[in-house]
Image (spheres, rainbow, N blue to C red):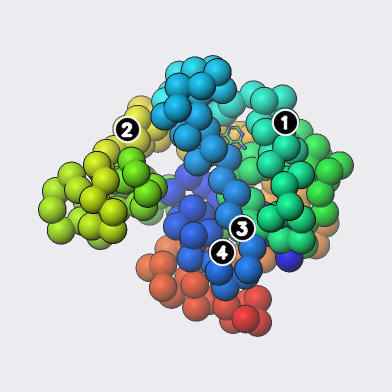
Amino acid sequence: MKFVFLGPPGAGKGTLAVRMTELLNAPHVSTGNIFREAIAAANPLGLKVKAIIDAGKLVDDGTTIQLVRERLTQSDVKDSYILDGFPRTIAQAEALAGFSNIDRVINFDAPDDVVIERLSGRLVCRKCGFNWHKTFNPPEKSGVCDKCGGEIYTREDDKAEAVKKRLDVYREQTAPLIEYYRKKDLMIDIDARPDVDSIVENLKKLLRL
Ligand code: AMP
């Protein structure tokens, strides 16, 4: 099955996608991860998008759509995938409908105070990408990933100014997708406030896994 994970920044889409990829037998495709890898590699895409992402704005539709269109031609995602962080605009959703048929959209719903608390404490491993949290899930040794020994850092776009911008962008450009997909009868709503394990259990029930 082909899934889209929708929701505000900080709702836990990425963490849940990592957890659900095996259960759903669907590869995780995250546009944010692809952009961050490009930035780390300092390749032309990375150089183009770094300032935009650091400021909490959206990369232009043309660049993003092309990237996903290409990724979805690969054989591992022929029958199933979890798209995390795409689409983020109506134009992206319309383009996606032209090159892939999605089966379900999971809408991860969480209020501003919850997502701000999560994002402002988030720590990310530079090597394996695992998400830690200063308060809720700190690594044993400060600055070092327990899973792989990689260096842990705060994403530039998790700093207060950028978080505010990302939430504004979400409300203006991404939230309209909720109605867009609801009308197409593809939507499953899930409360993204509980801890990850509880959300996984709820998802399993909703998807009859
Ligand atoms: P994420 O890891 O999904 O929060 O994405 C991090 C950042 O990458 C976003 O704040 C945007 O700047 C950029 N980005 C990721 N996905 C998209 C998208 N579908 N359209 C435009 N920009 C995106």
Q: Mark 3 or mark 4, which is nearer the start of the sequence?
A: 4
**Could you say which is closer to the camera, residue 116 or residue 152?**
152
Q: Amino acid at mark 4?
A: Thr
Relative placement, left or right, of 116 versus 47 is left
Q: Which mark is residue 159?
A: 2
> Which amino acid type is shown beneath numbered disc 3?
Pro
What residue does disc 1 label? 66
Give the amino acid type for the residue marked by disc 1 in the picture: Gln
Query: Any atom of ligand 1 within 8 Å of the CB at mark 1?
Result: no
- CA gap, disc 4 and disc 1: 23 Å
- Say which quarter of the image contains residue 154: top left
Mark 2 and mark 3: Cα distance apart in space: 29 Å
> Can you give x and y, in whole percent of width and height, for residue 107 in the image?
61, 58
- Residue 202: image location, x then y, percent: 53, 76
Mark nearer the N terminus (1 vs 2): 1
Q: Is residue 41 above or below residue 100?
A: above
Please tell me how crowded label 4 is: few (under 14), some (14-19), or many (20+) other residues with Cα within 10 Å. Answer: some
Tell me, yes or no, whether the two marked residues, 4 and 3, touch with CB atoms within 8 Å: yes
Which residue sits furthest front?
A: 75
Residue position marked by numbered label 3 in the rendering? 27
Of the pair 46 and 109, the residue shown nearer to us? 46
Tell me which label, 1 or 3, sits earlier in the chain.
3
Could you tell me how far apart the alpha carbons at marks 1 and 3 are, in whole angstroms?
A: 19 Å
Tell me, yes or no, if residue 73 can be seen here. yes
Mark 4 lies on a secondary structure that is helix
Q: What distance separates the C-alpha of mark 4 from that of mark 2?
A: 28 Å
- Tell whether 111 sits left or right of 29: left
